[in-house]
Every structure is written in C-alpha cells, then in structure tokens.
Image (cartoon, rainbow, N blue to C red):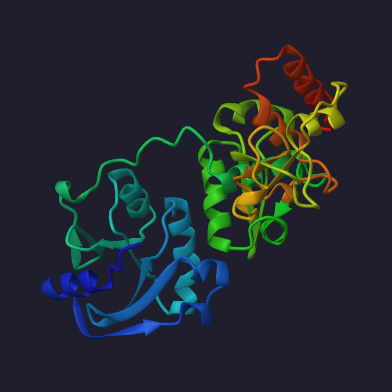
Amino acid sequence: MKDLFPELARHLSSLGAAKGEWRTLRLEESAPPALAAWYRAFETEVAGRRRPFLLVAHEGLQPADAVAHAKKLARPLGSPPAFVFPSLDREFARRLLDARVSFVVPRRLVNLPPRFVLLPEDGYSPPPKALPAKLSPSAQLVLLWLLQSPDGGDWTEFGTLRKKLIPNRVYLTLAVQDLERRDLVQTRRNGLRKSIRPAGSRRAVWEMARESLSSPVLRTRRLAKAPPGLPVAGLTALARLSSINDEPPRCVATFRGNLAAKAAAERHYDGEVVQEWKYDPLLLSPDGRTVDPLSLFLSLRNETDPRVRSALEECLEAMQW
C-alpha cells in the first residue's frame, strides 16, 4: 500500500494538530506479531499529549478488526491509537465513530476529538465494490481443508492453519476475511488465540460455496514422463475414488511454478498429463498419492460425459462429511 506517513504529517501540521517531532514506534515489541503486522506505528503530540498513530499497511482490514485492535493496543501504546487509512467509506467511518475510535484519512477526514474533527461529506470514498465472483486461491484452500480434514469440522486454531496451509499471518487473515464476508465460516477469539470453523454442516457449506469455488487447474502440459512424487489427478484420480474405469493418459497435479520440464520433454499427442494448480495439491491430499475429492470435483465439473458426472457425484456421496 501507499506510504501515508508524509501526507499524514503534512496534513496534521497544516491543521495545527501535530506538535513537535514524530517518533517511530516498534509495535512488534509491544503487540503480538499477527497484530503488529497490520500496521506501521508513529507517535507525536496532539492537543498537549502524545498520540500514537497506526498506519494501515495491508488491505482487508474490517471495522470490527480496527475496533478490537484499538482496545488491545491502547494499554501497550500508552493511549488509544488513531488509525490512518488511504480512504474510508461512510459506513466504515460510522462504525469507528460509534465505537469512539479515532481515525485520519490524510487530506480528507480527521476524527481526533475533542479539538480536531473535520468530516466533510466529500471526504468519504464510495462504498467497497461487490465481492468477486470467485474466492481467492488462498481462501479456497482454507475452506476445502475445513470441509475435508478430520479436524476441520470443529474449531481450528489459526496456528494450525499456519502450520498446515498458509504460514504468512497476513495472507491467512485475508483468506479468512474473504470467507467471513461470504458467511462461509465463523471465527472466535480466546485471548490471543483465534479459531475458525465452517458456518454450518460441512455438506451445507459446500453447497453454499460451490458457485464461488473455481477449478484449481491453471494450465495443463504433456510430458514424456511426469516427475515422481506427484499425486494423481483428473480422470486417473477419479478412477481411484469411484467405479469409473481408468483410461490413459495418466494425469498428475503439481503447484504452479514447481514444474521445471525441458522443452525436449514436452509432448503434444502422447505422454503423461501434468496439471499446474493455483495451490499445492499435496496440502489437501488425504494420502499424498491422490488429490482431494473436492478439488478433483472442481477440476472436472464442466465435463459433459455423463459417466464422469456420475462418478463425481459418487465421490461426493462417499465423503465423510
């Protein structure tokens, strides 16, 4: 995101709100890493007292997150923080105002009560755009794990998802927010621990999510011989998970960018099929040898062959929801 600090400093100085020097705060020394990763922190004097400012460093922050973070950080920072955004729509700002959370949008909005409150009507941005038609690959990965893992139907801590799926805290948080906005998951917090579970029975959530899920396959290549250790996919995997007969060519799947095949190994008319996926198929594979049933369904659901469509439904019915 754009560095907002220069605009913030100039704006508050022009209003006579910021007095003295700005000081950089090391938020990671006083806040949990997952929380500190959202912001860059600075401090200056406003209306005769030191005031911390949190510059939002990543997209995806929700009003409820800002309100919760303000409460958690007030004590370690010494006073309630003011949030700095590149833009705010009217509804987001109203949520912050109702919770008495201070904020600044440089050159547009200032809510630093009691002395500095400037909220002109033309300072608000348009409401956020409608949700994308499809989930992000990371959000789809998290949801499919929750729907298929033996432990995924109950509360699962974010720490578990970081170990198994997405190590980066911010990327995981954004993926979960994508799912929350579609009412596909529920989250709860117990102290510093945050957990997630499907928002209903796993089969019901799958049916709700189907239209927002996409095929994991980015592209398909044919090689004289596929690399070893890859899980089977496509019709090869379907034959393992249903009563349909297996037919050549053999098909396997790998994460995008992992396939380093020489041009001489490329084939057009024969050889084995290698699918390159949006996410690592091994993360969801139940045994390391076959891709997971739900990703397999998504990769083949546009097939028109009635035998394939029947076999896919057979796979869904055989699952332990």
Q: Nearer the viewer, residue 127 or 43?
A: 127
- Quarter holding the N terminus is bottom left
Numbered label tally: 0
Please report the residue visible at 62 percent of the width from the left and 22 percent of the height from the top: 302
User: In the rendered image, is residue 201 in sight?
Assistant: no
289 shown above or below 249: below
- Quarter holding the C terminus is top right
Q: Nearer the viewer, residue 191 or 142?
A: 142
116 shown above or below 271: below
Please report the residue visible at 37 percent of the width from the left and 49 percent of the height from the top: 95
Q: Nearer the viewer, residue 218 or 123?
A: 218
Q: Quadrant of residue 115?
A: bottom left
Residue lying furthest front in this view?
264
Residue 76 location (% of width, % of height): 49, 78
258 shown above or below 33: above
10 shown above or below 29: above
Residue 278 location (% of width, % of height): 59, 45
Residue 167 location (% of width, % of height): 64, 62
Apparent side of residue 156 relative to residue 87 in the rendered image (left or right): right
Q: Quadrant of residue 116?
A: bottom left
Residue 110 location (% of width, % of height): 22, 61
User: In the rendered image, is residue 211 in sight?
Assistant: yes
Please report the residue visible at 84 percent of the width from the left and 33 percent of the height from the top: 320
